[in-house]
Image: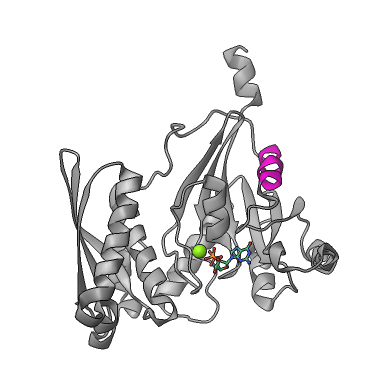
Amino acid sequence: MTELDKTESFRSGMVVIVGRPNVGKSTLLNHLIGIKLSIVSRRAQTTRHRILGIYNDPRAQIAFLDTPGFQLQHTNALNRAMNRTVTSALREVDAVLLVVEARQLTSADHEIIAMVPRTVPAIAVVNKIDKLGNRELLLPIIDELKTTYPFAEIIPVSAQKGTGVPDLIETLITHLPFGEPVYNSDAITDRPERFIAAEIVREKLFQSLGEELPYGTTVDIERFEHHGQLRRIHATVIVSKSAHKAMVIGAKGAKLKSIATRARKDMEQLFGGKVFLEIWVRVKHGWSDDVRSLRTLGYS
Ligand code: GDP
Ligand code: MG
């Protein structure tokens, strides 16, 4: 195969995953990328940053943006900033994956579909089909999707079990433009390790506290140092009330200790070296509505 042939058959593109909270966007992304990078949690609104994960195979490279989902209930500064991020991301991509659950569309689903631009191919991903007793139960939602938006494809999957995911990749590739790969094939993300470290700590917090985790909790990496193969990481969990601080720390510090241990193990695996991780918990008031804080975190 000559270089020219290669360029003319290889496809490369940016894809954004959208959908209301909890439909399974992060789970799907993790499955697509094959490495656990984004946050998965029962609680809505866990992925606050856009995460770029990259899928590579011999025919195609797909850069995925995992969006925070549209926040329709709260209207503070944080949510407004997140909605803007999502809306602008939609216009920059080569294809959109709209994820819905395999049951009737909700008004939140409809609101999101209404924001999908008609200028890029959109694929509807009907997720959680493992929850359906019978495949025929898919027909009404497929009909509903067809009448709502001119989707290029409608693909049923179970992001959790992986059912339909290979089909989804095959189909998605056919909708991407021809072009050279943009990232090194070993790149799993264009985010620096510092960012990934914060994502991992945040993920462990959500896993450990679940629904109890107070809204507005955030993670800051204050120090990230390389000492040969060792990484020294100093993270701060910022909460808005002293009572929340106590919840994160737990009795005799047990909760925070287990969060730190699990975060450190994931970091060691992902970074491929030893990690010394320290986590502190700090109280800061009124974080969610503080636009200046949002700016320092890159949301505005
Ligand atoms: P996101 O908010 O859209 O990113 O959703 P998540 O990926 O965080 O998933 C929300 C919840 O749905 C989690 O508890 C997942 O384990 C669950 N989930 C995701 N995909 C599936 C699926 O295919 N089947 C089932 N039964 N549960 C799923
Ligand atoms: Mg998510």
Vertical order, 285 against 116 (above or below): below
Farthest left residue in view? 227
Task: Give how far across and how far down residue 125 sits, in percent.
Answer: 69, 57
**Vertical order, 222 against 271 (above or below):** below
Judge whether 24 appears above or below 9 on screen: below
Residue 66 or residue 30, whichever sits in front = 30
The question of residue 171 being in magenta is answered with yes
Q: Residue at x 57, y 70 (%)?
A: 22
The count of marks equals 0
| Segment colored magenta | 166-175
Relative depth, front residue between 225 and 249: 249
Residue at the image position 34 percent from the left and 79 percent from the top: 289
Residue visible at 32% across and 69% down in the picture: 294
Residue sticking out furthest to the top: 2
Q: Quadrant location of residue 178?
A: top right
Whole-percent x, y for residue 159 in the image: 62, 57
Could you tell me residue 122's position as x and y percent? 69, 53
Q: Can residue 195 be seen in this snapshot?
A: no
Q: Is residue 207 left or right of residue 107?
A: left
Does residue 95 appear anywhere in the picture?
A: yes
- Quadrant occupied by the C terminus: bottom left
- On-image quarter of the N terminus: top right
Report the side of 37 relative to 262 (left or right): right
Dominant SS type (magenta): helix
Which of these two is toward me, 231 or 111?
Answer: 231
Residue 156 % position (x, y): 73, 57
Q: Is residue 93 positioned above or below 117 on the image?
A: above
* Residue lying at 23% horizontally and 46% vertically, measured from the top left: 274
